[in-house]
Image: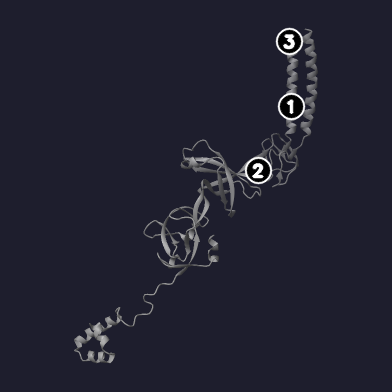
Amino acid sequence: MIHRLFSSMGRTQWFQWLCSMPAAYRSLAGLGLLLTACGPDSDQASPGVGTERPPTQVVAVAARVETVADTLSLIGSLAADEMIALQSETAGVVEQINFEEGQHVEAGHLLLQLDQSKLAAAVIEAEANLALSQSNFQRNRELLGSELISRQEFDQARTRFEADQALLDLRKRQLKDTRITAPFTGVVGARAVSPGQVISPNTSLTWLVSLDPIKLEFNVPERFLSVCREGQDLEIKVAAWPEERFQGKVYFVAPFVEADLRTTLVKARIPNKDQRLKPGMFANLDLTLTIRDQAIVIPEPAIFRNLDEERALVYVVDENNQAQLRTVRVGERKSRKVEILQGLDAGEEVIVEGSQKIGPGSPIVRAPEQAAAIYQ
């Protein structure tokens, strides 16, 4: 009613009419006028009311099909493929050292030579004694055939010959032991002796280490043994080269589970041509359990969580270029990518930047392709 009355009167007439009213009614009439002016029938509508919101620019990336591997993260220790402490089996004086510390040597390379003079003389003596006993043995065998000596005398001659033969073999072996050679190809460590030094048997002279390939030893919990097998691929990282990954294969799975830890020892070989990996290093490893060739993958920034529920959510761009909220089930996470097990199809676009400015049903416009390049 107030609205109709206000419409039929001019502003000056309305003001005069209002002033002529008692004070109590004047307040109510003024309030009615204010409500009428703010109502939907007002001729002076606020600018912008009822207009559509402009589209929001976002970065959208299509879900892709990639190969994804289920991995088990463990900690292992690197060990040399072969590693021994070189020692002397005989006492003697070091005459020659034929290696440099850290040198790469082939199998059979002469590393150290002891003085041979005493043992060489012992070999000559043993050869002379063997020649005499061999002559006596042959002569006594002929006499035994003619029954000119007893069987006991023949046995004594034969025993003496065999003993001298064994002694000569021993002296030759002792002489050979003065030459210490590399039993396999590897790298020589620091030497612990000097030329002219008198050494005794079992004295450590140096180390010999085979580094290519290098071994990785780790323990796998028993619940994962059903998917742990020889020939399995794995990937490791070490603190010395944190940005690099080294590939290897499992070659040994222990035939028993350790009762105390409920784990099984597993060994792998890793190519180490440049010898950057050293025995004793700790390694963080990812053991490949299964591989899925047709996995759906999206960039990790597209995923966010509902604060009230433990759900993974993404914004998907529909055919009308509007953002629609979608619940998804997440699988493996790797290098800023996430596998989607359920809730998304290959080729559907997800929003990776700008989702904080939109809601379900919000119109969107795609940013230039260059903005999405870092997510490809």
Q: Where does residue 193 sit, x and y in percent of width and height?
A: 70, 43
Q: Considering the numbered disc 2 on the image, is that residue within a helix, a strand or a loop?
A: strand
On the image, numbered disc 3 is attached to which residue?
A: 151
Q: From the viewer's side, name the closer residue of 254 and 224.
A: 224
Q: Tell me the kind of residue under disc 3.
A: Arg
**CA separation, marks 1 and 2?**
32 Å
| Dot 3 alpha-carbon crowd within 10 angstroms: few under 14, some 14 to 19, many 20 or more | few
**In the rendered view, would you say 287 is above or below 17?**
above
Q: Is residue 313 left or right of residue 174?
A: left
Spot occupied by residue 108 in the image (x, y as percentages of width and height): 72, 38
Determine the secondary structure under disc 3: helix
The N terminus - image quarter: bottom left
The residue carrying mark 2 is 210
The three-letter code of the residue at mark 2 reads Ser
Instruction: Mark 2: give few (<14), some (14-19) or many (20+) Cα within 10 Å.
Output: many
Q: In which quadrant of the rendered view does residue 24 lie?
A: bottom left
Q: In the rendered view of the protein, which quadrant contains the C terminus?
A: bottom right
Q: Tell me if residue 239 comes above or below residue 181 in the rendering.
A: below
Which residue: 79% across, 19% down? Answer: 134
Q: How many marks?
A: 3
